[in-house]
Image: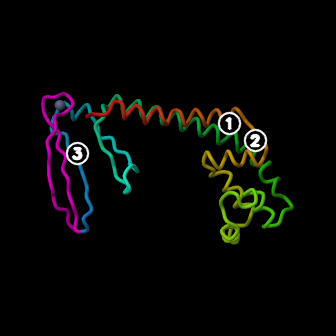
């Protein structure tokens, strides 16, 4: 597998006194790859590459740009704060609701458990998938995993199934989402160029 350099282009660096270089390469399979290099020594000590997966076009690609180290520090701080908030929400929800969740399925056979879990097939997983997954690990282990690994949407469904609204947990999750949004907005607002 070899990469061939297709083009290089120089652009003005953030301080304007020098440049950075974008190099585009292609491999034998026509896959493309783009890399950035900071030519300016002053900017090299102040700016870092930020990259993010982009799903805007049909093919997933990576978007790259420069952000200042100060912006990066703020970005990391916001994400850490979001992580703390999610961690707190996770602890509270396990403490308060995991046993309630398990109780909900007590005395139910597999089919009945599936009906409760998916609101009679309205949600993932399909019955066949549920049977397959629970065959090896058992229903209880599956349900615990489903609860512990729940993403925001699945957790909201679990709470609906339990008929519980917990403003504290949902507040922490909302806060985390907001912080993640803020972090994302920040780097895009402060991006160079
Ligand atoms: Zn510069």
Q: Residue at x 16, y 34 (%)?
A: 12
Write the start and end of the magenta stretch as one range. 1-28
Ligand 1 visible in quadrant: top left
Q: Write the residue at 27% across / 33% down.
A: 192
Q: Taking 163 as reference, is 51 left or right?
A: left
Asked whether 131 falls inside the magenta stretch, the response is no
Element assignment for label 3: strand
Label disc, if present, on residue 36 of the rendered structure: 3
Q: Position of residue 159 (x, y in %)?
A: 73, 45
Labels 2 and 3: the sequence-earlier one: 3
Q: Which residue is mark 2?
A: 96
Measured in 3D between alpha carbons, the distance from the residue under mark 1 to the one under mark 2, in whole angstroms, is 10 Å
Q: Residues within 10 Å of mark 2 (few under 14, many from 20)?
A: few
Q: Is residue 50 left or right of residue 184?
A: left
In the depicted structure, whether residue 144 falls above or below residue 168: below
Name the side, left or right, on which 93 lies relative to 8.
right
Position of residue 130 measured from the top left corner of the image (x, y, whole percent): 69, 66
């Amino acid at each position: 597998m070899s990469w061939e350099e297709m083009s290089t282009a120089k652009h003005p660096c953030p301080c304007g006194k020098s440049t950075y270089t974008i190099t585009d390469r292609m491999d034998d399979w026509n896959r493309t790859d783009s890399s950035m290099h900071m030519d300016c020594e002053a900017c090299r000590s102040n700016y870092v590459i930020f990259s993010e997966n982009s799903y805007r076009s049909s093919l997933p690609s990576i978007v790259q740009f420069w952000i200042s180290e100060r912006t990066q520090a703020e970005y990391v701080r916001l994400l850490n704060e979001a992580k703390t908030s999610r961690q707190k929400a996770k602890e509270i929800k396990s403490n308060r609701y995991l046993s309630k969740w398990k109780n909900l399925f007590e005395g139910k056979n597999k089919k009945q458990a599936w009906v409760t879990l998916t609101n009679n097939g309205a949600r993932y997983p399909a019955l066949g998938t549920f049977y397959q997954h629970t065959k090896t690990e058992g229903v209880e282990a599956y349900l615990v995993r489903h609860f512990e690994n729940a993403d925001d949407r699945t957790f909201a469904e679990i709470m609906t199934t339990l008929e519980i609204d917990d403003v504290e947990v949902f507040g922490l999750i909302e806060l985390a989402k907001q912080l993640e949004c803020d972090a994302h907005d920040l780097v895009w607002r402060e991006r160079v160029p």
